[in-house]
Amino acid sequence: MVDNSRFISFEGIDFSGKTTQIDLLTNQLEQMGEHVLIIREPGGTKISERIRDILLDINHDEMTDLCEIFLYSAARNQLINDKIINELETGNFVIADRFVDSTTAYQGFGRRIPMDLIRDINRAATGGLLPGLTFILDINPDQVLDRKKQRNLEIDRLESTGDDFYERIHKGYHKIAELDPIRVKLIDATESINQIKTKIWEFVSQKMNFKY
Ligand code: TMP
């Protein structure tokens, strides 16, 4: 099995601030002379980007839950084999904007696909590869709604129906962190960008034995 210590994933519901923190961490690592590949799920390879288009097409609202999970997992398997393993073997960092915990949170807790099936599908898709560190940027769905309203952004179907889909995902992420505390770090996403950046850097430098 490939060494996963340079594999870091970011998780959280949309608008948790993942992209900002991914860019900041990448800059810090690059300043230390490290090479970093950022990947975004679903996507990151020719085939996985096409799967992304199918998944995120708003006209596909008849998609079944199982079709959805198989597509996310198919895109992930392709990405691991096309890119992630090579990069890690070369000694580069891989920073993932979402990985397997998104499937557990969204399809497992959100869509309520049974957890034993989620585990089997995740394992088949990843061959057991997990990030060495995962940051969940923790924000509750009401705070996301506030952020969206402040920026005059559209509220999507699930958010507006009062469905507790995002609430289940939010709680699911907490459960994921609770079950795997060494790998998964829950970070309060309502703190300032700089406070969050500092916390993340502490975990990364501790894990990598960086002196700073
Ligand atoms: P994003 O690129 O804006 O994060 O959008 C990806 C969407 O896909 C986001 O709403 C979360 C969702 N998703 C899942 O439901 N399951 C998964 O396994 C992954 C990777 C993403």
Image (cartoon, rainbow, N blue to C red):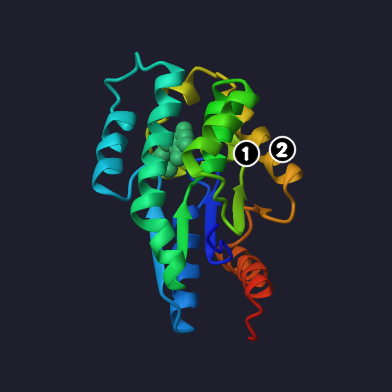
Please give the residue where the numbered disc 1 appears in the rendered image: 140
**In the picture provided, is 209 more to the left or to the right than 34?**
right
At horizontal 53% and vertical 39% (from top left) the residue drawn is 102
State the image coordinates of residue 112 (x, y, percent, origin top left). Answer: 59, 20
Q: Amino acid at mark 2?
A: Lys
**In the picture provided, is 64 more to the left or to the right than 123?**
left
Q: Report whether the residue tagged 2 is closer than 8 Å to ligand 1.
A: no
Q: In the rendered image of this protein, does residue 132 appear above or below residue 42?
A: below
Q: Amino acid at mark 1?
A: Asn
State the image coordinates of residue 13 (x, y, percent, origin top left). Answer: 53, 40
Please give the residue where the numbered disc 2 appears in the rendered image: 175
At horizontal 50% and vertical 53% (from top left) the residue drawn is 17
Front residue of 24/89: it is: 89
Q: Is residue 152 visible?
A: no
State the image coordinates of residue 120 (x, y, percent, origin top left). Answer: 57, 30
**In the picture provided, is 68 more to the left or to the right than 58?**
right
Question: Which of the two discs, 2 and 1, labels the residue nearer the N terminus?
Answer: 1
Q: In the rendered image of this protein, does residue 61 appear above or below residue 91?
A: above
